[in-house]
Image: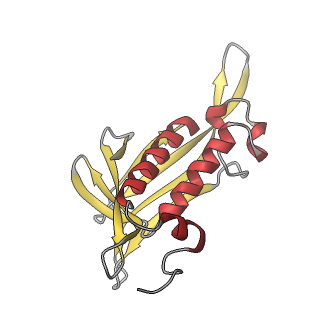
C-alpha cells in the first residue's frame, strides 16, 4: 500500500483496488484512500493507465527530458512545462452528485532565499492533496523523487491487482475493446 506522511502529521494510505468485468476478470483499478487507518474516500475509477503514464513522465523529467531540463536540480523536474500545472486529479462522484473523495497533485514554484548567495532560488514541489467524503482535507509536499517513488509503488500494486487480466490489450486499446466472451 502506497502512502504519504502529510503536513498535518496524518498518514494518507492509497491502495489500488481492482475493477472487474461481468465475469470477474480484473481490467483496471480504483484508488481507496485511508487517513490514519480510517476510510477516507474512493477515487480515480479506471486510473491505472494514467498512473503508469505519469510514472514514465516523472522519470523522464528527472532525467532531463523535454522542458524539464531547464531545472538544474532533478528534484525540481516534473513532466509539466507550466510552472504551476496539474499532474492529476482523481475524483469520485456518486450518481446523486455527492462527492466521495478527491486526490490531486499540483505543482507549485516556491522561491527560497539563499542568504549565502544573496539571491532567491526557485524550487518546484508536488502538492498532493486529498479530501475525504466529509470535506476535510490533507496535503503532502513532495520532490519529484518522492513523487516518483509514490507513483511507482501504486503502479506495482495496481499491476498485482490486475494479474489474470489482459493488461496488454487494456494498455493499448482500453478495456472492453477485445473479443466478447
Q: Nearer the viewer, residue 133 or 153?
A: 153
Which quarter of the picture shows residue 22? bottom left
Q: Which quarter shows the C terminus?
A: bottom left
Q: Nearer the viewer, residue 32 or 53?
A: 53
Picture layout, residue 3 above or below residue 167: above
122 sits to left or right of 155 = right
- Give the percent coordinates (x, y) of residue 132: 32, 61
What sort of colour scheme is used for the picture?
Answer: secondary structure
Residue at the location (28% across, 58% down)? 40
- Give the percent coordinates (x, y) of residue 140: 43, 43
9 sits to left or right of 119 = left
Picture layout, residue 8 above or below residue 173: above
11 sits to left or right of 7 = left
Question: Can residue 77 be seen from the camera position used here?
Answer: no
Residue at the location (78% across, 46% down)? 66
Question: Can residue 55 be seen from the camera position used here?
Answer: yes
Number of disc labels = 0
Which quarter of the picture shows residue 112? top right
- Give the percent coordinates (x, y) of residue 120: 71, 27
Residue furthest to the left in view is 38
Residue at the location (55% across, 45% down)? 126
- Give the percent coordinates (x, y) of residue 158: 41, 56
Q: Nearer the viewer, residue 172 or 151?
A: 172
Picture layout, residue 78 above or below residue 116: below
Picture layout, residue 19 above or below residue 80: below
75 sits to left or right of 100 = right
Amino acid at each position: 500500500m502506497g502512502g504519504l506522511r502529510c503536513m498535518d502529521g496524518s498518514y494518507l494510505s492509497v491502495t489500488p483496488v481492482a475493477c472487474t468485468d461481468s465475469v470477474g476478470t480484473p481490467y483496471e483499478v480504483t484508488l481507496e484512500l485511508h487517513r490514519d487507518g480510517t476510510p477516507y474516500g474512493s477515487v480515480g475509477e479506471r486510473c491505472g493507465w494514467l498512473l503508469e503514464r505519469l510514472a514514465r513522465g516523472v522519470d523522464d523529467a528527472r532525467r532531463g527530458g523535454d522542458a524539464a531540463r531547464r531545472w538544474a536540480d532533478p528534484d525540481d523536474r516534473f513532466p509539466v512545462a507550466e510552472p504551476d500545472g496539474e499532474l492529476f486529479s482523481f475524483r469520485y462522484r456518486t450518481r446523486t452528485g455527492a462527492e466521495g473523495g478527491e486526490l490531486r497533485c499540483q505543482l507549485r514554484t516556491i522561491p527560497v532565499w539563499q542568504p549565502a548567495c544573496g539571491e532567491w532560488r526557485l524550487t518546484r514541489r508536488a502538492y498532493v492533496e486529498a479530501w475525504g467524503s466529509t470535506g476535510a482535507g490533507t496535503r503532502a509536499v513532495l520532490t519529484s523523487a518522492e513523487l516518483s517513488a509514490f507513483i511507482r509503488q501504486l503502479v506495482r500494486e495496481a499491476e498485482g491487482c490486475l494479474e489474470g487480466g489482459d493488461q496488454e490489450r487494456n494498455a493499448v486499446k482500453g478495456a472492453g475493446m477485445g473479443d466478447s466472451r
